[in-house]
Structure formats: structure tokens, C-alpha cells
Image (cartoon, rainbow, N blue to C red):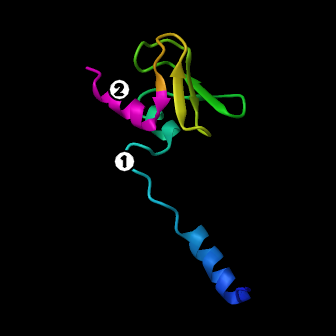
Amino acid sequence: MSVPADTLAAMDVTAVSAPEPEPPGTGRIADLVAAYTPLSPLGKQQLRGNCPFCRSPMFRVRPRHNTFHCFSCGAGGDARMFAAKIGHQP
């Protein structure tokens, strides 16, 4: 069974041009965190800054994996968890 080339091309374009919408709270972690603390590059795949929860400089953001982690207080997770945790801060 063969599929005509024009149909196959139309299917590929449709799949690429229509990204799935992101659920609320799952956007880019770097943009979300940067609203609360300045971030600077650390190597090619990480960003560092002061933890918005404990103010330690041991806070890391990995945009490629959409995660954050503080090596001091242990806070970590994805963008949704960051938004939930920061919402409960005074």
C-alpha cells in the first residue's frame, strides 16, 4: 500500500506546524524562575542563581529538562512544582 507523495507531505507539514498547547504551569522553567531570581549560565546546559526559597547560591535550572534543584534546601522539580511552591511563599 503506497501513499501519494503530496498526501504524505501535507501530513508532515500539519504535524510539524501544529504544536500541542502546554498545560498551565508547564512553560519554560528558565523564564518562570528568572521572574524571581537572576540566572546566569553555568556550562552549556544549566543556569545558576540564588534559590528563591532559601537564598542559597546552590540553585540550578536545567532548561533542556525543564527542571530546577537547590542543593542546599533540596527544593526541586519541574515548572509546575516551582509555580506551586513559589505561590505558597510569603
In the displayed structure, would residue 86 be above or below residue 58? below
Q: Secondary structure at mark 1?
A: loop
Question: Residue 88, position in %: x, y?
Answer: 28, 24
Provide the residue designation for mark 1: 24
| Segment tinted magenta in the rendering | 77-90
Dot 2 amino acid type = Lys
- Which SS type dominates the magenta stretch? helix
Viewed as shown, does residue 80 lie left or right of 38? left
User: Image point 52% across, 37% down: which residue?
Assistant: 30
Question: Residue 58, position in %: x, y?
Answer: 56, 14
Q: Quadrant of residue 49?
A: top right
User: Image point 72% across, 28% down: which residue?
Assistant: 43
Q: Is residue 29 magenta?
A: no
User: Image point 48% across, 24% down: which residue?
Assistant: 76
Q: Is residue 82 magenta?
A: yes
Name the disc covering residue 85, or none.
2
Viewed as shown, does residue 87 lie left or right of 76? left
Q: Dot 2, crowdedness within 10 Å: few (<14), some or many (≥20)?
A: some
- Between 71 and 49, the one lying in front of the other is 71
Dot 1 amino acid type = Pro
User: Mark 1 or mark 2, which is nearer the start of the sequence?
Assistant: 1
